[in-house]
Each structure stands twice: as structure tokens, then as C-alpha cells.
Amino acid sequence: CSELSAGAVRGAGKSRESESENKLDAETASDSESKSEFGGSAPVPTSDDTPEVLNRALSNLSSRWKNWWVRGILTLAMITFFFIIIYLGPMVLMTIVMCVQIKCFHEIITIGYNVYHSYDLPWFRTLSWYFLLCVNYFFYGETVTDYFFTLVQREEPLRILSKYHRFISFALYLTGFCMFVLSLVKKHYRLQFYMFGWTHVTLLIVVTQSHLIIHNLFEGMIWFIVPISCVICNDIMAYMFGFFFGRTPLIKLSPKKTWEGFIGGFFATVLFGLLLSYVMSGYRCFTCPVEFNNDTNSFTVDCEPSELFQLQEYNIPLVLQSVVGWKTVRMYPFQIHSIALSTFASLIGPFGGFFASGFKRAFKIKDFANTIPGHGGIMDRFDCQYLMATFVNVYIASFIRGPNPSKLIQQFLTLRPDQQLHIFNTLKAHLVDKGMLGSLEDA
Amino acid sequence: FSNLNDSMVTGFSILWKNWWIRGILTLAMISVFFLIIYLGSFMLMLLVLSIQVKCYHEIITIGYRVYHSYDLPWFRSLSWYFLLCVNYFFYGETVADYFATFVQRREQLQFLIRYHRFISFALYLTGFCMFVLSLVKKHYRLQFYMFAWTHVTLLITVTQSHLVIQNLFEGMIWFLVPISSVICNDITAYIFGFFFGRTPLIKLSPKKTWEGFIGGFFSTVVFGFIFSYFLAQHQYFVCPVEYNSETNRFVTECEPSELFQMKKYSVPPLLQAVLGWETVNMYPFQMHSIALSTFASLIGPFGGFFASGFKRAFKIKDFADTIPGHGGIMDRFDCQYLMATFVHVYITSFIRGPNPSKLLKQLLILQPEQQLSVYKTLKSHLVEKGILQPSLRG
């Protein structure tokens, strides 16, 4: 049934397109224009994908409650799944992030195909996946080489791949670019350029952010878990507060959101973040950077916890003393950072959601896809996460740690001797200045 | 008959007039190019920046025309705002390295440098939130298209112009030879095509021919070879650009690296018979120039085809009308962008390692304990390699 309608839409799209290619400047893409070539077709119908099992179990309830139950069950299922993955370790997490990334890419590209009726140009699918492969290869090469440094240096082919990594990635990308240029077909130029642009913007959004998530993960699993949990918590809390107290609408884009939900969600998320980080900071497996152990060939999380994760006494400001009744409180410094993360998740994270809502309205789709019953596609769940991942990465780079010392040493070793000497002397002068190196040289 | 004669004469004179205008403007642009080179690196940087802004403006204007989005005034502000953000980010990342000593002296600049990524991200986020808040009911799709158009344009023009500037700082020769090779390829491919052209090259650009393509390739390689020979002799072109904090100017003065020192190469026996020499004195850089010219001739034109396809897709004849007879700035620079990225990747992969000043800057940001441990590692490494004498204290 859906194939038939898709076929009809495709046929109509083709004739509309060739006719509109002859139009000169009469190009409008506003939503009210129904005969525009950008797919003024009906929105893709979202069929009921609920599995049979759930259908039978909930056949008694009315459809509204059924929807609520389906959403609830799926939410719990996803959260449980999340915990299982955390338990299984960094390697599995990385794989999951990779799968989510590919699925999101696939969803957005499919929307592009639907919008532009470009199923008939088979090159696109190949080219889109090829570009995804190239960009992933580039990013994984850049990050993985740092973490797997000793492993890479040992294996000869890996060493060459890593030394000329940028050149190889660029050559791969160029091949894709030239294939695109050669694939330009006479009546479909504009379509092809749109898909090219669509692919690149999608890559920019999906792939770069998923790699930032992996960067954060390597910093310590707590930097991965706390931000994601805060966004999920904010989603749920804002929904509940809105459900019970919601009155003033927040933004025209998403009529269901309310100011009460927004503010309630904010406070609830900050509190949740504080509690969660308190619990997690006690465990080394969450707070230590992930390292690759060359001897055991596996990931280890074992280290001396940094001062971020050591309990400290903080003086409570006088304002709060009367409220809380304590003079000092023992907290992890990380909890202060978690306030910043939760604040971002509650205040700015929703803008990612509004962006996705606007996108869905612009292209007249209800959900990104139908992967998760009751929730829509993977993208629907992850739209707020992307801004969060970038923020956490920038936050870590700016406020938590500086550059990676081992990476710096690696780069140093590739310099010329005279450059090495110059840097060494400058560093030495700086250390002497700071009083770190006295007149007694013992190193 | 006289009408026919008149129209023939006017037609003929129009053809010549167009040709003359193109010729004169070509010479004018080349002269401006030489003038700017003479004026130095700083002027070149400004020139690159102006070209980038103009290219961006041209492409965005095309977007406005395609989508009739003049009525949504937010877009223009937002587009220019995003351009500012991305430029701020890139200039902060690269320029800060070169002006390290200058920056160290001033407190406020130090703060800006230290939190540079965070500040850039905050600025970008503001723009993003403004975009979301500016979404208007009937114009969602339009606004999203312009948002995407802006970002793709930024990706193309801004990142590549910064790569051009980074190549420039590596040494002006890394800026001049690639650009000249692309221009030379354009001109010689046109000339070869004009005289010998017969087999069309690609449906996208019906005027291009295989004869032009191949002839252009060989002439560009020869041109690059000869041109680099001349440039490699002058320190002005060969030395990395450095900022002298005392004189507050850019200086290009150094000991030329081994790339720019004459070496004897044995001519392979194949060519010996042809040329009659057994060895030849060349700069190693000339070998690299062959790689650069090859790229300029073989892959560079794809940038041109891409731009041609783009113009056909959006039914425009030229990007703009800035240069009489030639079109817009983008029309002149479409092949250059791929070249700039290639040169940058080439340099980082084959020529030099990481940037020493950037490395130093990162070292100085580390925690003192980390600095100390790095210092010890470096010292042991240098002693091992014999670069540092272990007996001396330091």
C-alpha cells in the first residue's frame, strides 16, 4: 500500500520536475505553495508500527491510554537498555554511538529523498553512504590514533595509514566529489545539488557530534552519562510539570510546551544532576579516563581520581545557611560542574528540540521515522542531545583539562631537532620562571 | 546588403570588444596580484579576507534570489552574523599562534585566547537560538533552506580561505605557486582548446576539450617547474612568515630549509638521452611543484565543473557582475578552493610536522606538574638523540 502511493508520488514528482525546470525565476519554496517542486505531496503517513505483542496486551484500553502506556513502556525499555550498555563497557558504548549515528544519518537522508523524490537517481544513495564512510574514517583516524598510539606504532600498515591520514582522507573525499561532478545529469542538476548540500549538512550535524560524544566518553564515562541523563530527565520532567501545572505556552513552534514545564524541568534537572553526580563520583569506573591497555588489548578504567572527584568542604553562602541549616557541606567539585551541565541541558538543549520541530513542520513530516513505536525515529529521541554533546566537549576543553600531554609529546617527537631544542629551552625558561625548576637539576 | 554588412561588422566588433575587455581585465587582475605580493603578507591576508567576504556575499545573494527571501530581513543579519562567528573562531585558532608573543603581553587577549573555543561556541549558539526564535509560521521551509545554504557556503568559502592564509604563513611560495598554477591552467587550457580543440571533455562545460585539458596539463607542469625555480631563490618567498613583536611587523627572514637549497639530481637514463645532461641542479621544491601543478590541472577543473553545474542548476549565467567580462569573484576563484585544501593537506602530510609555536602554546597551558613531567620526558629524549649534552646543566 505504501509502495503504491510512493510510486504514484514519484511519477507525479518527475513530471512536475521537468515542467518546473523550465520555469525561470518563479521559484518559491514557501509552505503555502502547493505546486512547488519541493514535494508538496501529502506527508508520509505514519503507520501504526506497534508490535503485535503490545497490541494484544493493550487491546482493552482506550487508544489514548494505550498510546501513553506504549510510550511509557518504551521509555523504560530504552532506559534499561542504556544501563545495560553502560555496564558492558566503553567498547560497546562506542559501537552503540556509531550505530545511532548511522541510523540518524539514514533517517535524515531518507527524508531528503522523500522531499526531493530522488529515488530515481541511484548514485545518491551510494554517494551519501560513501561520504558518510569518508567522514567517519577521517574522524576515527584522528581520535583513535591518539588513544591506540602504541598499538598503531607497532603495526607497519597502521603506522603508514596514520602518518598520511589526512592526505588519505582528503583523497577519499575528493574521489567522492569528482564522482558527484561526473554524475550530474542534465535535467536533474538542481536536485543533485540539493541532495549534495543536504548530505553535507547532515554529515556536519550527525557525524561531528557523535565523535564529540565519543571524545567525552574517553574523558571519563561520567562525562557521557551525566549530560545524556540530564537531557532525558529534562524531557521527562518538563513533560510532567507541563502535564500537571502547564498553562502558559512557551513557543509557537511546539504548542505543547509550557513555561511551567520549562522552569519546573530546569530546577528538577539541576537537582537530579547534583544527585546523580554525587552517586557516580564515588566510583572509579565512571570518573577515570578510558585507556587502552596494550598488554591486555582491552579498555581499562583505572586511575587515581583527579581532584574533581575528591570530596571537599565548601562553605555555604549565608543566604542558603538559614534555609538548609548547615554551615559547610561536603561535595565533589564535579557537582558544581554538573550544575553548569544541567543548566545548559534545560535552557539551551530544548532549542535543539525546537529546531527539530521546526524542521518537521517545514517538511511536513510527523516524525523522523517509525523506528521506535510511540516515539518516532531515533532522531526524535536524540535531537536535544547533539547540542549537549558539543557543549560538554567545549566545556571540558576550556575549563577542565588542557591539551593532552602525551599527544603533545608525540607531536614534539616529529619536529626537527632545532625546533625541539628551541621549544625545550623556552619550556625550561618558563619552568624556571615559575620556580618549578630550581637551580638544582635532578632530571 | 548594407544592413547585413552593418550587422556583420557590429557583430564582429562586439566579439572583439568582449575579447579585449576580458584581456584587459585579466591583465589588470594579474597586475593587482603582483602589486599585493609586493606589498607583503599583511596586505595579502586582507586581500584574502575581502575575497572571502565577497564570495560569501555572492553565493548568499543567489540564495536570496532563488528563494525570494528578501522579505525576511532576519536572514541577512543572521547570515552575516554566522560569517562573523566562524571567522572569529578560525582567526582565533590560527592567528593567535602566530601572534603568541604579542598576545602574552596583554591580559585581556590572554583571557580571550584561553577560553577561545568556549566564546566562539557561545557566539554561535546565540545565532542558533536567534534562528530558532525567528521561525515564522508560513516560512519554515524557506528559513531552513537559507540556514542550510548559509552553512554550506560558510563551509566552502570560510574554511578554504583560512587554509589559504595558513599556506601563506608557511611561506609565500606555497601561496603563489598553487594560485599561479591554477590561473596558468585556466589560460593555457583555453589557448590549447582555442587552437587545437576538437573532442569535448564533459557535457557540463561544452567549451572544454580534451586537447585543452591535456595541453593545459603539460604547460602548467612546465610553468610551475620554472616559476618555482625563480621563486625558490628569494628568501622573501621561501621563509615562513613570522610576526616580529619588536618592530610590530611581519618578517620573512630565515635560513632557507633544505627544500630550497640546490641539490644535484641524477637524471634518469630515459631522459638523459633526450636532454643530454647526466645530472641537474634543482631545488627539491620543484619536485613538489610538479605534484601541485598536476593537481591544479587534473582535479582543479572539477571545481570549475562543480561551479558550472551549480550555475546551470540555478539558472544563472554568472555568480555576479562584479568584474566586467568575467562575472563575479566566485567565477574566478571556483577552481582555487580545492587547490587551497590540497596544498594544506599536502604540507601537513609531506612537508612539515606540527606547528612549533602552536605546540609551545599548548605546553604553556598545561598544569605545572604536567609541564614538569613533559619537560623530563623531552630532556631524556633530547639527551638520547644527542641533541642535548647530558653533562651540561641544561
Image (cartoon, rainbow, N blue to C red):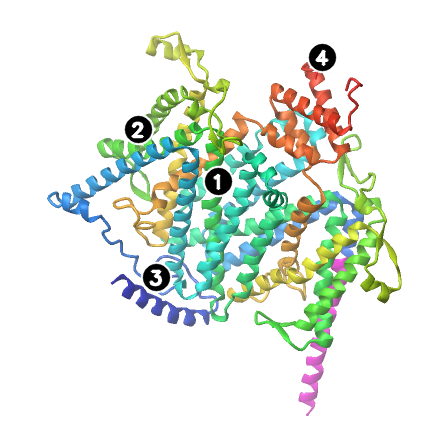
Q: Name the kind of residue labelled 1 in the image.
A: His
Tag 4: amino acid:
Gly
Task: Name the chief secondary structure element in magenta.
Answer: helix
> Do discs 3 and 2 belong to a common subunit?
yes
- The chain to which mark 4 is attached is A
Q: Which residue is mark 1?
A: A211
Residue beneath disc 2: A264
User: Do pointers 2 and 4 mark residues of a single chain?
Assistant: yes
| Residue at screen point 61% across, 40% down | B90
Upstream in sequence: badge 2 or badge 4: 2
**Mark 4 Cα within 10 Å, few/some/many (few <14, many 20+)?**
few
Going from N to C along the chain, the mark reached first, 3 or 2, is: 3
Q: Amino acid at mark 2?
A: Gly
Q: Are marks 4 and 3 in contact (CB under 8 Å)?
A: no
Q: Which mark is residue A40?
A: 3
Q: Chain of mark 2?
A: A
Residue B121 position, x and y percent, is: 51, 36
Visible residue check, residue B57: no
Relative to B181, B277 lies left or right? right
Disc 1 secondary structure class: helix
**Of B92 and A184, the residue lying toward us:** A184
Q: Where's residue A419, x and y in %?
A: 75, 33
Q: Is residue A77 magenta?
A: no
Q: Secondary structure at mark 4?
A: loop
Query: Which comes sooner in the sequence, label 4 or label 3?
Result: 3
The residue mark sitting in front, 2 or 4, is 4
Of marks 1 and 4, which one's residue comes earlier in the chain? Answer: 1
* Cα–Cα span, label 4 and label 3: 75 Å
Residue B357 placement: quadrant? top right
